[in-house]
Amino acid sequence: MATPVTPPIERFYRHTVREGSCLIWTSTFAGTKSRRPQFRATTKMSEPKVYAHRWIYEQVVGPIPEGYEIDHTCKDGRCVEVAHLEAVPPAVNQSRERQILCTRGLHDLSSPENCRWDNKGRRRGCIQCKRAATAARYRRNKGGQ
Ligand SMILES: [Zn+2]
Ligand SMILES: [Zn+2]
């Protein structure tokens, strides 16, 4: 009798441990700068290893669009909880970690003082650009008189 093959998804969850709302990868990691969870979906040693967070995302949510990265919304790179994973274009992932730039790419809108806010507390553009535009209009009007 052949030994029953453990489904990959079952083997996947054996490598995890629950920490609060996060599901932490306990198996191997790859990479030097940012360590990413690594997983071999088959038992064949010839098969390449894949990134665990990308693999589980594709199993549960669906295919990751070409060139997209998986962003950890909980900011824990060891986490493979699907609810914490989001497929984003590479640029979005970087700007989230650093800053949110205004539409002209000049000002950091992650600083609240750089933002215009509406009465519902939503960002409504860049206050610096708005000031610059107002000042330019003022200069133009003065110059025309
Ligand atoms: Zn998490
Ligand atoms: Zn601006």
Image (spheres, rainbow, N blue to C red):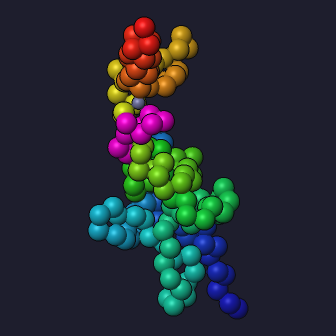
Query: Is 143 situated above or below 23?
Result: above
Residue 133 or 31: which is nearer the viewer? 133
Find out whether residue 70 is within the magenta segment.
Answer: no
Residue 138: x and y, percent? 41, 13
Q: Is residue 122 left or right of residue 136?
A: right
Q: Is residue 51 visible?
A: yes
Highlighted range, magenta: 97-106
Find out whether residue 100 is within the magenta segment.
Answer: yes
Residue 63: x and y, percent? 66, 63
Q: Residue furthest top?
A: 145
Which residue is pictured at 57% across the width and 80% down the height? Answer: 42
Query: Is 110 situated above or below 34?
Result: above
Q: Residue furthest front?
A: 145
Q: Is residue 11 left or right of residue 110?
A: right
Which residue is pictured at 66% across the width and 81% down the height? Answer: 4
Residue 131 or 135: which is nearer the viewer? 135
